[in-house]
Image (cartoon, helix red, strand yellow):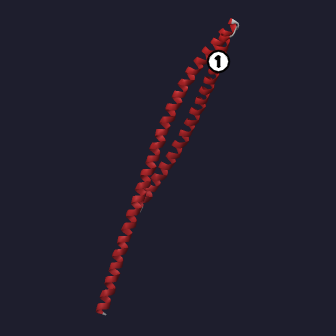
Amino acid sequence: MAETVVFSKILHVRENEKKDAQKIYYQAMDVFEKVASELYVLLKKKETAEEIYDQYIQTTTALDKIIDQVNYIEQLNQQIVMVEHNVHKARTDMETKQLKLTDAHVEVKKFEKIIELRRETEANEAKQVEKAFMDEISMNQYLSHKNG
């Protein structure tokens, strides 16, 4: 019985670790989503800018406008490269946090299983003791009837 209590305390600690790992993972996931959304917005801006550039090329447009558009697209490309790096970093961080969460979950499951097995063992031992006690009572009743 004492062992089960000890394992229950350890399980409680592991569950707290799992909850902490979950919070950290969800925070990392939020960071990833924000950075990925930023990248999406930049890519949409670049797509729109390229469409405008194509329209400028197709029609008679001032050279200054075309140059400004090319510079704007180049600026977007530089921003995209930086944000892609941030997305990669955020994804890696999120995946690391997910592995830690998975490990914490496995640890919790291990201790839940150990506790379950210990309780089953304790229940079986209690049944054996009860069965032996009942056998002894039956034996005493039989002997008292036989002698009495």
Where residue 53 sits, quadrant-wise, is top right
Q: Is residue 103 visible?
A: yes
Q: Amino acid at mark 1?
A: Glu
- On the picture, is 44 further left or further right than 140? right
Which quadrant of the figure contains the N terminus? bottom left
Query: How many numbered discs?
Result: 1
Instruction: Find residue 128 and report its horizontal and vertical position in percent.
Output: 35, 71
Please state if 100 lies on the left or on the right of 77 as rendered: left
Please identify the quarter of the rendering in which residue 59 is found.
Answer: top right
Looking at the picture, does residue 54 appear above or below residue 103? Answer: above
Name the residue carrying label 1: 51
Packing grade of label 1 (10 A; few <14, some 14-19, many >=20) is few
Residue sticking out furthest to the front: 58
Q: Residue at x 62, y 21 (%)?
A: 47
Q: What residue sits 46% from the left and 52% below the top?
A: 11
Location of residue 32 in the rendering, given as x and y in whole percent from the top left corner: 56, 32
In the image, residue 9 sits, relative to residue 73, either above or below, namely below
Occupied quadrant, residue 39: top right
* Percent coordinates x, y for residue 148 in the rendering: 31, 93
The residue located at (60%, 14%) in the rendering is 74
39 relative position to 8: left or right: right
Q: Position of residue 81 (x, y in %)?
A: 55, 20
Helix, strand or loop under label 1: helix
Q: Quick check: 64 above or below 131? A: above
Furthest-top residue in this view: 63
Q: Nearer the viewer, residue 59 or 116?
A: 59
Q: In this orientation, does residue 68 appear?
A: no
